């Protein structure tokens, strides 16, 4: 029988979906979340410790009370716009928080970490689709902190043998098929939940941020991936490390891009709602096209997205939003 997996940020969107899959696999799960963005109700099980990674006494309790053999690290702030206004918050929560975590792991002899990274580490892409070997020049402070966290893990591997798998996600969307957990950010800034809030009548229209990009219909193209497929990749990454695998970096995307207009069109057909759209100015820092090559994850982790139609992704999110109009709190 395996020892426990510590999931930091396990009450957040991607974290809670990963906890759900781990529980399904029969894993013992310990969650650390300061509940700044996370929701208690997003946890379908596991043992929650409500507190902060930067609180050394708190983290001692977590490591002493549980036999942890691997960490999956989601806990971080993740809003691009906010990171440009307040980069200090991102260096403090993300970079210093990760430093505290790695030092505790080293102190307690925990040698495996799977890390929630992002396509924002690349910045403006050199190639489409993006490869893990492409240059990393983040265009925002959020991406810069995630890149700094990856680099920190590399030196903790060299010095202390802590192995890491860093997963660079593209656009996570969708909700758990059981219908009990889904996406609930405050404030909400992501395209899919915002479009569905329009379909629910909670917003008058969706704003399209620019229609003069160098793409077929002029709107930005993104690579959307179902949150449960992302969750599965974390479990494969833990298995690779448990089997003695080396550290590595992997893109996670579907390899297919959808424009903002295409996403809205699919949401219209899934919901049966007209979803009015208004063209507005571009949003700062948005590259025209972001599409992943996930070839490395397929070959080395054996990962294959199973829920890869955009209709299916949006339909699963729609089911959640209809049943939880005001998210977890109501
Ligand atoms: N977007 C938009 N209107 C919105 C929110 C997002 O047009 O109200 C666009 C955004 O400019 C980007 C795409 O939708 O091109 C996906 O944005 P999101 O914030 O969901 O994810 P990101 O790509 O920033 O991680």
Image (cartoon, rainbow, N blue to C red):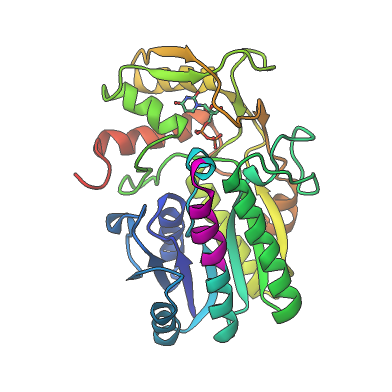
Q: Nearer the viewer, residue 59 or 67?
A: 59
| Residue 202 visible in the picture | yes
* Residue 245 appears in the figure: no
In the figure, is residue 27 to the left or right of 45? right
User: Is 86 situated above or below 257?
Assistant: below
Name the quarter where the C terminus is drawn. top left
Q: Residue 124: horizontal and vertical position, in percent?
A: 71, 34
The segment highlighted magenta reads 85-98
Q: Is residue 282 left or right of residue 244?
A: left
Q: Is residue 110 magenta?
A: no
**Magenta span: chief secondary structure:** helix
Residue 271 sits above or below residue 189 on the image? above
Residue at 33%, 65% in the rendered image: 45
Q: Residue at x 29, y 59 (%)?
A: 40
- Asked whether residue 92 is drawn in magenta, I would say yes
Name the image quarter holding residue 271.
top left
At 26% from the left edge and 21% from the top edge, which residue is drawn?
201
Residue toward you, 15 or 124: 124
């Amino acid at each position: 029988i395996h020892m426990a997996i510590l999931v930091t940020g396990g009450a957040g969107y991607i974290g809670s979906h990963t906890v759900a899959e781990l529980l399904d696999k029969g894993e013992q799960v310990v969650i650390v979340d300061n509940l700044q963005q996370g929701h208690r109700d997003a946890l379908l099980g596991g043992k929650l410790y409500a507190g902060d990674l930067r609180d050394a006494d708190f983290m001692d309790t977590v490591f002493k009370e549980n036999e942890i053999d691997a960490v999956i690290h989601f806990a971080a702030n993740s809003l691009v716009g906010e990171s440009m206004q307040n980069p200090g918050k991102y260096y403090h929560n993300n970079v210093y928080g990760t430093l505290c975590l790695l030092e505790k792991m080293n102190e307690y002899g925990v040698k495996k970490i799977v890390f929630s990274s992002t396509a924002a580490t690349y910045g403006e892409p050199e190639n489409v689709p993006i490869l893990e070997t492409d240059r990393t020049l983040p265009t925002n402070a959020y991406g810069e902190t995630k890149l700094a966290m990856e680099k920190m893990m590399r030196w903790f591997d060299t010095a202390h043998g802590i192995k890491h798998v860093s997963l660079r996600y593209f656009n996570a969307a969708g909700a758990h098929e059981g219908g009990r957990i889904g996406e609930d950010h405050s404030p909400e800034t992501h395209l899919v939940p915002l479009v569905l809030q329009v379909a629910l009548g909670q917003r008058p229209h969706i704003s399209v941020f620019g229609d003069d990009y160098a793409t077929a219909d002029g709107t930005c193209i993104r690579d959307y991936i179902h949150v449960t497929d992302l969750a599965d990749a974390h479990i494969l990454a833990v298995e690779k490390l448990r089997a003695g695998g080396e550290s590595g970096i992997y893109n996670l995307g579907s390899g297919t891009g959808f424009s903002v207009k295409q996403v809205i069109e699919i949401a219209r057909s899934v919901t049966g709602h007209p979803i009015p759209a208004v063209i507005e100015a571009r949003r700062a820092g948005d590259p025209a096209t972001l599409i992943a090559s996930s070839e490395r994850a397929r070959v080395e982790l054996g990962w294959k997205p199973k829920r890869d139609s955009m209709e299916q992704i949006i339909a699963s999110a729609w089911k959640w939003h209809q049943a939880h109009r005001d998210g977890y709190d109501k």
